[in-house]
Structures are given as structure tokens and as C-alpha cells.
Image (spheres, rainbow, N blue to C red):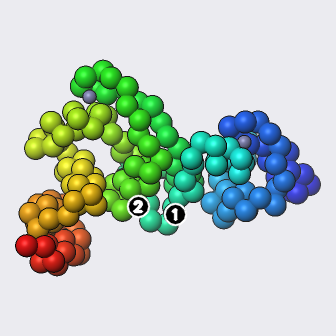
């Protein structure tokens, strides 16, 4: 009975194709947990073909941070997918890419409930006044492209404002590696 319940659910939520339940992503412990919590829900499952075609990145969900107080239904992100959003400032469309998401939620450790509201150029404009998490995300992208002592020190002080002494210390140490 239990096996049957799992079997009829194994359909790619993107292309609608049935896929063998032995698929490695389907056996992901989080998907089992998802089924326990939402027995009638559609599993956020993508088949291998769709993942490859859409450039989907499988998330390392254990690195994600969830704002527990925000919603009791908050659930980890299993896959990062490119997403078209509209900038609240200039109203232009922009893409929050799968790799940007991976960076935000795994490297910068921004809560998974948070996502960019503005396109990159508007975010640059708002950098000085924007929320700390967005300033950090932007700076982390900048140091990945072109690291400098000044950027790492800026990061360190932002992390200090957030009370994250470990990250602040790491950034100070990184700053020393650049003139
Ligand atoms: Zn598919
Ligand atoms: Zn914009």
C-alpha cells in the first residue's frame, strides 16, 4: 500500500513525464520528509532531462538557512531554477538565476524566504541604503569577481552589524591577503 502511494506520485513536475522511482533525487531524504508532511502534495521533483535542459542546480539544502519565525511551513529548496522577476524599482524584468540562488542561499547564507526585489543595476543604486543581507550578497559577488582588501573589510563590518563574529573574522583574515 505504502509503495503504491509513492509510485503514483513519481511524475516530473516540469514536463509531466513519469520517471522511475529509483531516481536518486526522488530518494532524497527531504522528499520523503515532504511526503510525510504533505501527503497529497505534488513532489517538487524534476527528471534528469528537465534538470539538464533548464540548467537546474541541485541544492545542498544543509547549507541553507531558514527564518524559522517567518513561517512554520518554510521548507528547504531542493533545486535552484532560473526565475524571471519584475524589478520593483524600474519595473524591468530580470532573471534571478539558478547559480545566483545557489550563491545567495549557500555562500551568503541569506534566509531562503528572501529573494531580490530589484534588478542588479537598481540593487547597485540601493547598495548604500539597502538591507544588510542584500549588501552582503552584492559584495560577495564582487569579491568573487575582483577581490580586494577594501571589499573584505566592508564585508567584515556588515557581518559585525549582523552579529556574525565568525564570518567577520574570516573576512578580516581574507582582507590581509590583499594590498
Ligand atoms: Zn521532466
Ligand atoms: Zn531595476
Q: Quadrant of the C terminus?
A: bottom left
Report crowding for label 1: few under 14, some 14 to 19, many 20 or more residues within 10 A (C-alpha): some
User: Mark 2 to mark 1: distance in Å?
Assistant: 7 Å
Q: Quadrant of ligand 2?
A: top left
Q: Which residue is mark 1?
A: 60
Callout 2: few (<14), some (14-19), or many (20+) C-alpha neighbours within 10 Å?
some
Give the mark nearest the N terminus, 2 or 1.
1
User: Residue at the spot x=36%, y=53% of the render?
Assistant: 104
Return the x and y of residue 96 as percentages of the image width and height: 41, 40
Task: State left or right for residue 57 relative to residue 137.
Answer: right
Whether residue 112 is visible to the viewer of this picture, yes or no, is no
Contact check, label 2 and label 1, Cβ < 8 Å:
yes
- Which residue is pictured at 38% across the width and 56% down the height? 103
Q: Which mark is residue 24?
A: none
State the residue in front, 122 or 71.
122
**Where residue 64 appears, x then y in whole percent?**
44, 60
| Residue assigned mark 2 | 106
Is residue 57 visible to the viewer in this orientation of the structure?
Answer: yes
Q: Is residue 17 above or below residue 94?
A: below
| Residue 65, x across and y down, in percent | 40, 59
**Quarter in which the N terminus is drawn:** bottom right
Q: Secondary structure at mark 2?
A: helix
Q: Residue at x 53, y 58 (%)?
A: 59
Amino acid at each position: 500500500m505504502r509503495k503504491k502511494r509513492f509510485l503514483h506520485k513519481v511524475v516530473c513536475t516540469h514536463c509531466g513525464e513519469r520517471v522511475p522511482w529509483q531516481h536518486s533525487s526522488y530518494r532524497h531524504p527531504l522528499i520523503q520528509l515532504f511526503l510525510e508532511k504533505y501527503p497529497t502534495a505534488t513532489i517538487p521533483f524534476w527528471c534528469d532531462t528537465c534538470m539538464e535542459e533548464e540548467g537546474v542546480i541541485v541544492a545542498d539544502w544543509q547549507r541553507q538557512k531558514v527564518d524559522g519565525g517567518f513561517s512554520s511551513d518554510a521548507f528547504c529548496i531542493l533545486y535552484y531554477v532560473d526565475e524571471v522577476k519584475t524589478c520593483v524599482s524600474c519595473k524591468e524584468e530580470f532573471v534571478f538565476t539558478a547559480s545566483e540562488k545557489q550563491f545567495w542561499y549557500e555562500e551568503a547564507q541569506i534566509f531562503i524566504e528572501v529573494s531580490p526585489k530589484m534588478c542588479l543595476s537598481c540593487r547597485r543604486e540601493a547598495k548604500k541604503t539597502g538591507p544588510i543581507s542584500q549588501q552582503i550578497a552584492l559584495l560577495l559577488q564582487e569579491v568573487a569577481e575582483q577581490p580586494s582588501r577594501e571589499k573584505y573589510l566592508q564585508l567584515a563590518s556588515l557581518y559585525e552589524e549582523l552579529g556574525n563574529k565568525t564570518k567577520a573574522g574570516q573576512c578580516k583574515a581574507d582582507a590581509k591577503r590583499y594590498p
